[in-house]
Image (cartoon, rainbow, N blue to C red):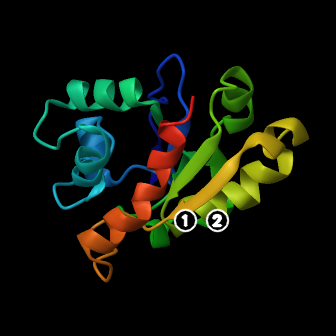
Amino acid sequence: MRVHSFPPVIGSMPKVMLLGSMPGRLSLEMHQYYAHPRNLFWPIMGSLCIAEPDFPYSERLAALQETGIALWDVLQACDRAGSLDGNIITESEVANDLPGLLDGYPSIQVLGFNGGKAWMAFRRLVQPVLNPIIRERLKLIPLPSTSPANAGTSFEEKLQKWQVILQYLKED
């Protein structure tokens, strides 16, 4: 089944862009990033930047933007059965225009990758075509997936690893 990602969530001066691979089935149905109730993205964001999981979705997005966090996906489209990244057909992957977005937002200094698939797809599809000046300014940080499919890593372990982004949000 062909699936398509959402537009980016981005404020005026983002510092960190968090990139997933492709929204899962429930997220696509609800038109919300990380909508699955067992996905730990929003609990982690609640701990890091007051984007509390029980806030309305629009308030969570606003809290991210006010903190300097942008959201998007590496992939614009792909063929995938179900929600698992492992079901994405690699040959069907089409990347979002990250080079264009990063060119338009020089305040973005860090890309955080929510899981291995986002990291691998970026390295394969986007990194080779990035302008060398943009590539030079970016810090790339692979992070553990917040997906319920990554149940082998505890919330506490994930939160600890995700805390690395805080240092980049505090910089002026």
Residue 33 seen in the figure? yes
Which x, y percent locates residue 125?
A: 74, 53
Which x, y percent locates residue 5?
A: 47, 40
**Element under label 1?**
helix
Outermost residue, top side: 12
Residue under the point 41% across and 59% down: 162
The circle drawn on residue 117 is: 1
Residue 72 seen in the figure? no
In three-dimensional space, the C-alpha distance between marks 2 and 1, rounded to whole angstroms, equals 5 Å
Residue under the point 32% across and 63% down: 159
| Residue that label 2 marks | 120
The circle drawn on residue 78 is: none
Which x, y percent locates residue 3?
A: 46, 47
Which x, y percent locates residue 52?
A: 18, 40
Q: Is residue 107 left or right of residue 103?
A: left
Rendering quarter of residue 158: bottom left
Label 1 crowd bin: few (<14), some (14–19), many (20+), radius 10 Å: many
As shown in the figure, which amino acid type bears the numbered disc 2?
Met
Residue under the point 52% across and 16% down: 12
